[in-house]
């Protein structure tokens, strides 16, 4: 009888020792990372059995999620009294003492390891056997509801610097004399990759067929052109065959006349942000027997 009593009581005693004798009362003073905390006793701790994104991850999506998790931790853990049960195993390498973290509340303690899993802030990687059922259930709920890490990723579409809408100011060379200056503004859309003849893998150098359509004088003088373009990073050279269709009420004439001419553009793009930039161009346009040298400044959106 005594032997049976010992067999029953021994596991209960072990559980009691793990949960209460080894449990430490701590106070978290600083959130160092999404799963790294500094206590008031200058001890670094982390939550066991969890693979949590870090602000030091190379992947930008995981890094952004880590910042969100840290905000959650600051709200619910920093400067609060907690209970910490160290893990018998060293679950997290180079992250201090790993274990099971509980936020203290008047009626009951909240298992923060389980909360991280419930919200999809971590992947469950069993390292010790404590609270396995609770952790598995929390992790499964996050997976089924596609929370946090389990949320389907939307691939960010990078700006296409080859195709852009531009607001352009053309300056004829003689117009650098302010007395003769007359603003020539227009709008256009340029496709620099209608067809790619050659392009390096990182897209820093390319040879393409390009096109452009727009207006030369505000909403008047519509034009279109087509020709080859060579690009190297932010620098480009393009040749084009142009067709210019004057509006009848701009040029007093009995009939419309289409002007066609060749042009050469040499330009450089200056990034301002992820989706906007300035483009500086030197344009040489040969109309009939006259060559016009033009400098243009364009505000481009990608």
Image (tube, rainbow, N blue to C red):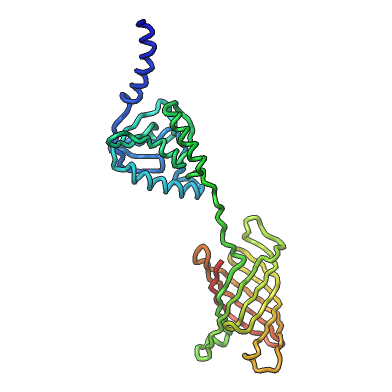
Give the side of residue 209 with respect to residue 155, left or right. right
**Horizontal and vertical percent position of residue 239:** 69, 74
- Determine which quarter of the picture holds residue 121: top left
| Of 169 and 112, the residue lying toward us | 112
Number of dots carrying numbers: 0
Left or right: residue 89 compared with residue 200: left
* 6, 286: nearer the viewer: 6
Tell me residue 69's x, y (percent).
41, 45
Name the side, left or right, on which 86 lies relative to 197: left
Locate the C terminus and report the quarter of the image it occupies: bottom right
The structure residue drawn at horizontal position 32% and vertical position 34%, both measured from the top left corner, is 109
Residue at (56% x, 72% y) in the render? 279
In front of the other: 282 or 272: 272
Quarter-wise, where is residue 204 in the image?
Answer: bottom right
| 232 relative position to 148: left or right | right
Q: Position of residue 189 (x, y in %)?
A: 61, 72
Q: Is residue 63 above or below residue 49?
A: below
Image: 17 above or below 290: above
In the rendered view, tell whether residue 131 sits above or below residue 255: above
Report x, y in % for residue 213: 64, 75
Residue appearing at x 70%, y 64% in the figure: 195
* Residue 1, image quadrant: top left
């Amino acid at each position: 009888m005594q032997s049976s009593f010992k067999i029953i009581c021994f596991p209960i005693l072990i559980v009691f020792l793990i949960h209460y004798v080894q449990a430490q009362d701590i106070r978290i003073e600083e959130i160092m990372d999404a799963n790294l905390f500094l206590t008031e006793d200058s001890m670094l701790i982390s939550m066991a059995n969890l693979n949590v994104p870090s602000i030091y991850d190379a992947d930008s999506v995981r890094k952004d999620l880590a910042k969100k998790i840290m905000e959650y931790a600051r709200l619910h853990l920093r400067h609060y009294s907690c209970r910490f049960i160290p893990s018998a195993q060293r679950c997290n390498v180079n992250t201090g003492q790993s274990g099971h973290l509980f936020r203290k509340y008047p009626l009951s303690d909240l298992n923060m390891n389980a909360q991280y899993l419930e919200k999809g802030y971590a992947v469950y990687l069993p390292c010790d056997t404590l609270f396995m059922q609770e952790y598995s259930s929390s992790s499964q709920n996050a997976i089924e509801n596609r929370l946090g890490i389990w949320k389907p990723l939307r691939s960010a579409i990078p700006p296409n610097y080859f195709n852009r809408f531009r607001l352009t100011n053309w300056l004829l060379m003689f117009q650098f004399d302010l007395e003769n200056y007359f603003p020539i503004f227009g709008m256009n859309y340029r496709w620099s990759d209608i067809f790619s003849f050659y392009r390096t893998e990182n897209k820093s150098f390319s040879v393409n067929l390009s096109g452009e359509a727009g207006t030369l004088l505000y909403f008047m003088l519509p034009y279109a052109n087509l020709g080859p373009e060579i690009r190297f990073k932010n620098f480009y050279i393009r040749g084009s065959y142009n067709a210019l269709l004057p509006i009848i009420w701009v040029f007093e004439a009995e009939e419309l006349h289409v002007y066609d001419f060749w042009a050469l553009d040499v330009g450089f793009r200056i990034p301002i942000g992820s989706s906007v930039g300035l483009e500086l161009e030197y344009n040489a346009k040969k109309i009939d027997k006259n060559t016009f040298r033009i400098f243009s400044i364009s505000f481009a959106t990608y």
